[in-house]
């Protein structure tokens, strides 16, 4: 059930158990993938998770701009400040809670959003506004999670499965040629590089040619199953605040 495609009377009558709030970014994804990749992925996983959920889940409109200042050297990349991002997520959630949808899963498609989403969902829950938790799709795909790069095999595979028309297949060789094989420059467990432009010429990390549509379908299935399981736990959880310890 998509909020943006649904009338207010339908929302009222549906009485959804919870909302899935897709959160992405608008940032470079190499020469072969669109700047909206993370937003597309968040929405695709939210849709698939809602379809797998055994109940009524409301899919909210996608938040398309996130914390992506690290990609500022690549034209077209957009970003907001952490304060603005957290406020937007919080106030969108407050709007949902105002209408009685007070259990929220933020379905995230961008690694740079993770820390801020952890913070704002915890604050929303502690403040009693809504019970909210974050879910990042590429952390929920089993052994494939270790293969995550940037515009690499996983993100390209999921695009090929869900939005193949947006992948510039004629640029895959170019994407591979100038890609980095790892995220950053590591010394003593510390990443010396703050921005991808410091270690990848074209913004790609990993081998996008290794991510075909079949892998993308598998990733979508794994992420959707994990999200549906999480949604059930969120809908069923007793969120009574714990008592002060004396």
Image: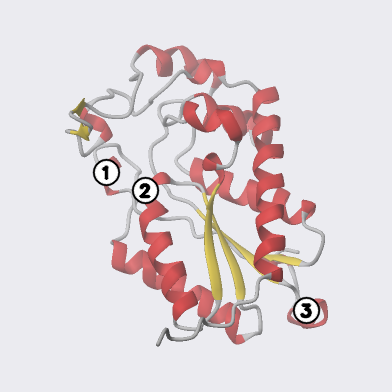
Instruction: Give the CA distance from mark 3 to mark 1.
Output: 40 Å
Nearest to viewer (mark 1 / mark 2): 2
Instruction: Give the CA distance from mark 2 to mark 3.
Output: 33 Å
Q: Position of residue 90 (x, y in %)?
A: 45, 74
Residue assigned mark 2 = 112
Mark drawn on residue 58? none
Q: Position of residue 130 (x, y in %)?
A: 55, 78
In the rendered view of the protein, which quadrant contains the N terminus? bottom right
Helix, strand or loop under label 3: loop
Which of pointers 3 and 1 lies earlier in the amino acid sequence? Answer: 3
Q: Residue at x 44, y 69 (%)?
A: 122
Nearest to viewer (mark 3 / mark 1): 3
Instruction: Give the CA distance from mark 1 to mark 2.
Output: 9 Å
Helix, strand or loop under label 1: helix
Residue assigned mark 1 = 70
Could you tell me if the residues under marks 1 and 2 are in contact, i.e. CB atoms within 8 Å?
yes
- Structure colour scheme: secondary structure
Q: Residue at x 64, y 42 (%)?
A: 223
Q: Residue at x 70, y 31 (%)?
A: 217
User: Farthest front residue?
Assistant: 246
**Mark 3 surroundings within 10 Å by alpha-carbon count, few (fewer than 14), some (14 through 19), many (20 or more):** some
**In this rendering, is residue 17 above or below 43?**
below
Which of pointers 1 and 2 lies earlier in the amino acid sequence? Answer: 1
Could you tell me if the residues under marks 3 and 1 are in contact, i.e. CB atoms within 8 Å?
no
Q: Residue at x 38, y 37 (%)?
A: 28
Residue assigned mark 3 = 15
**In this rendering, is residue 166 above or below 176?**
below
């Amino acid at each position: 059930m998509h909020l943006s495609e649904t009338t207010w009377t339908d929302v009222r009558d549906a009485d959804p158990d919870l909302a899935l709030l897709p959160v992405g970014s608008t940032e470079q994804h190499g020469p072969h993938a669109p700047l909206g990749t993370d937003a597309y992925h968040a929405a695709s996983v939210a849709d698939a998770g809602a379809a797998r959920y055994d109940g009524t889940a409301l899919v909210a409109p996608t938040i398309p701009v996130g914390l992506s200042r690290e990609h500022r050297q690549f034209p077209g990349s957009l970003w907001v400040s952490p304060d603005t991002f957290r406020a937007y997520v919080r106030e969108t959630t407050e709007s949902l809670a105002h209408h009685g949808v007070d259990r929220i899963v933020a379905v995230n498609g961008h690694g740079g959003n993770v820390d801020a989403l952890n913070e704002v969902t915890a604050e929303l829950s502690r403040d009693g506004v809504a019970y909210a938790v974050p879910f990042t799709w590429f952390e929920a795909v089993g052994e494939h999670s270790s293969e995550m790069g940037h515009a690499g095999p996983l993100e390209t595979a999921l695009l090929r499965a869900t939005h193949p028309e947006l992948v510039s297949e004629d640029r895959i060789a170019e994407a591979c040629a100038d890609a980095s094989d790892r995220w950053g420059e590591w010394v003593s467990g510390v990443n010396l590089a703050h921005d991808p432009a410091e270690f990848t010429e074209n913004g790609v990390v990993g081998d996008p040619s290794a991510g075909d549509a079949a892998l993308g379908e598998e990733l979508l299935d794994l992420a959707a199953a994990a999200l549906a399981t999480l949604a059930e736990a969120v809908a069923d959880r007793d969120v009574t605040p714990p008592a002060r310890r004396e």
